[in-house]
Image (cartoon, helix red, strand yellow):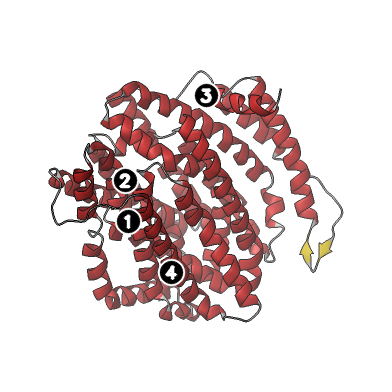
């Protein structure tokens, strides 16, 4: 786990710095500089692009990770990369050619709510396509770097670059350098530049000798890509379909309120994203080498470490959520407290499973990902419709649909890996860790510090003080307990280097 911890530590710092900047953007700048309606519009454009990005990517970002390490010669690796790098264009070009039809469909959907304010999307649908293509090729070249065991630079571009770009553009709006209407256009340009930077870095790490020759197993590669494109598309639906559904019923402002709650709830997944950048290629390598012992070792260690770190941020987020919402200028955001709990619980469950998904996607049984992810997509769509439209549960219903879907279908994946590979992510410390998280959550959830109210330029400072004081207590007690009980060998080893 040495290389994992070295790069995961760097990636975690990058991701949390990105989340810090993203938090400032979400809780302070978006809500004050761009306002709810245009913030909701940005949320819609980005979520819609996330829905079609996996289709455009053609699954190539997963295909590179699965197959690259299986080739033993540079010649075969070069044939492989040459043959897959242009495949996304087979999807991107036809979608772009028929974009007018997609534009008309989007307009008919968002106007179902009867809100004329939703007409603001009319001039922005093309940016859905531009951002989707840019993100698709970014992921392709990021995977190119990952198989060279270099994930940090790509992670900087993925987690930090976007949020810094957003912050700069939001200040540009505030100082009237650009207009609110131009914000999305400049954001799209930032995505294009990010892709170009990732491409140059990927070529710096490894330049193949491009040829028109196909690798010997191209049919298998192509078949895998088809499975993964469908599975990946279905998986994306779970993450973004709810944000896309909201404007058709309640308008873009509600999409903004929900986006803030989802962002806060998703904060805990940063360690998983950091560790996943390097775990994916290492899992693929161990499976390609038929090293079952190493695969199981990665499975168990990733689970307990992600649960430990994710558990700390689960407690921090949910025990400070009411104070976080006090930072926002509009009280409508505060209705998302239960949304935060449901989303963060779903994320914590996924972290408990470690690299479960990477094991399935990189094994010979990867085909099971398609029916599972399709089932998740269908489930979340109908549960969203039922809870949100039929039962009128509001955005809490959307979060509940996501939670149920994630737990049920990923519970099946847990069972599948146990049955087919005879391994689980659990150790004798797993139950202890779950109990610690539960006790800490219940112990700190129902009270907050109450410092006197004071403001700086009309911005509330007292909630930040309350959060800081409570967080210090939580972190100190949490770390003391997990280190004393020796929950994670890796964490204790890391602490012993600096604390004698």
Position of residue 21 measured from the top left corner of the image (x, y, whole percent):
61, 57
Of pointers 3 and 1, the one earlier in the residue sequence: 1
Q: Is residue 452 left or right of residue 175?
A: right
Q: Residues within 10 Å of mark 4 (few under 14, many from 20)?
A: many
Task: Tell me how far mark 3 sits from mark 2, CA to CA.
Answer: 27 Å
Question: Residue drawn 52% across and 80% down?
Answer: 181
Question: Residue drawn 65% across and 24% down?
Answer: 496
Q: Is residue 330 left or right of residue 90?
A: right
Mark 3 secondary-structure assignment: helix
Q: Which disc, if any, is residue 430? A: 3
Residue holding disc 2: 373
The quarter of the displayed image where residue 434 is located: top right
Q: Residues within 10 Å of mark 2 (few under 14, many from 20)?
A: many
Identify whether 326 is placed above or below 131: above
Position of residue 391 measured from the top left corner of the image (x, y, whole percent):
47, 55
The answer to whether one can see residue 367 in this image is yes
Of pointers 4 and 3, the one earlier in the residue sequence: 4
Question: Residue drawn 14% across and 43% down?
Answer: 217
Residue holding disc 4: 248
Task: Tell me how far mark 1 sits from mark 2, CA to CA.
Answer: 13 Å
Residue holding disc 1: 54
For the C terminus, which image quadrant?
top right
Looking at this view, is 384 or 221 the one in front? 221
Task: Tell me how far mark 3 sits from mark 1, CA to CA.
Answer: 34 Å
Q: Nearer the viewer, mark 1 or mark 2?
A: 1
């Amino acid at each position: 786990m040495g290389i994992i911890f070295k790069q995961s530590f760097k990636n975690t710092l990058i991701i949390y710095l990105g989340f810090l900047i993203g938090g400032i953007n979400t809780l302070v700048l978006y809500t004050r500089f761009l306002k709810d309606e245009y913030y909701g519009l940005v949320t819609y454009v980005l979520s819609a692009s996330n829905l079609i990005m996996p289709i455009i990517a053609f699954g190539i970002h997963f295909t590179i990770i699965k197959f690259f390490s299986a080739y033993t010669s540079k010649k075969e690796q070069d044939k492989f990369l040459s043959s897959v790098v242009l495949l996304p264009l087979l999807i991107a070009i036809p979608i772009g050619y028929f974009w007018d039809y997609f534009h008309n469909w989007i307009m008919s959907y968002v106007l179902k709510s009867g809100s004329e304010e939703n007409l603001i999307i009319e001039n922005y649908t093309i940016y859905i396509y531009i951002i989707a293509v840019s993100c698709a090729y970014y992921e392709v070249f990021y995977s190119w770097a990952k198989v060279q065991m270099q994930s940090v630079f790509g992670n900087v571009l993925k987690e930090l670059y976007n949020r810094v770009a957003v912050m700069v553009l939001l200040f540009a709006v505030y100082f009237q350098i650009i207009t609110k209407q131009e914000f999305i256009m400049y954001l799209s340009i930032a995505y294009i530049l990010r892709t170009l930077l990732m491409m140059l870095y990927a070529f710096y790490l490894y330049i193949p000798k491009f040829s028109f020759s196909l690798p010997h197993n191209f049919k298998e590669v192509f078949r895998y890509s088809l499975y993964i494109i469908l599975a990946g598309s279905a998986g994306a639906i779970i993450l973004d379909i709810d944000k896309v559904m909201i404007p058709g019923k309640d308008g873009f402002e509600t999409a903004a309120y929900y986006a803030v709650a989802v962002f806060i709830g998703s904060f805990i997944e940063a360690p998983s994203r950091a560790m996943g950048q390097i775990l994916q290629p290492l899992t693929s390598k161990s499976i390609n080498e038929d090293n079952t012992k190493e695969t199981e070792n990665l499975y168990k260690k990733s689970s307990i470490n992600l649960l430990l770190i994710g558990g700390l941020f689960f407690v921090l987020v949910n025990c400070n959520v009411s104070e976080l919402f006090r930072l926002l200028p509009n009280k409508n955001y505060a209705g998302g407290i239960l949304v935060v709990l449901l989303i963060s619980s779903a994320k914590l469950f996924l972290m408990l499973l470690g690299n479960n998904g990477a094991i399935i996607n990189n094994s010979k049984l990867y085909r099971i990902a398609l029916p599972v992810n399709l089932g998740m997509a269908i489930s979340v769509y109908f549960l969203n419709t039922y809870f949100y439209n039929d039962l009128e549960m509001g955005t809490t219903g959307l979060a509940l649909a996501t939670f149920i879907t994630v737990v049920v279908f990923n519970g099946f994946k847990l069972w599948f890996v146990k049955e087919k590979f005879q391994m689980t992510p659990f150790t004798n410390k797993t139950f202890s860790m779950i109990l610690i998280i539960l006790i800490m959550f219940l112990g700190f959830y129902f009270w907050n510090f109450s410092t006197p109210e004071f403001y700086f330029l009309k911005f509330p400072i007292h909630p930040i003080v309350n959060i800081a004081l409570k967080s210090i207590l939580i972190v100190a007690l949490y770390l003391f307990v997990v280190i004393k009980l020796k929950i994670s060998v890796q964490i204790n080893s890391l602490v012993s280097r600096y604390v004698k």
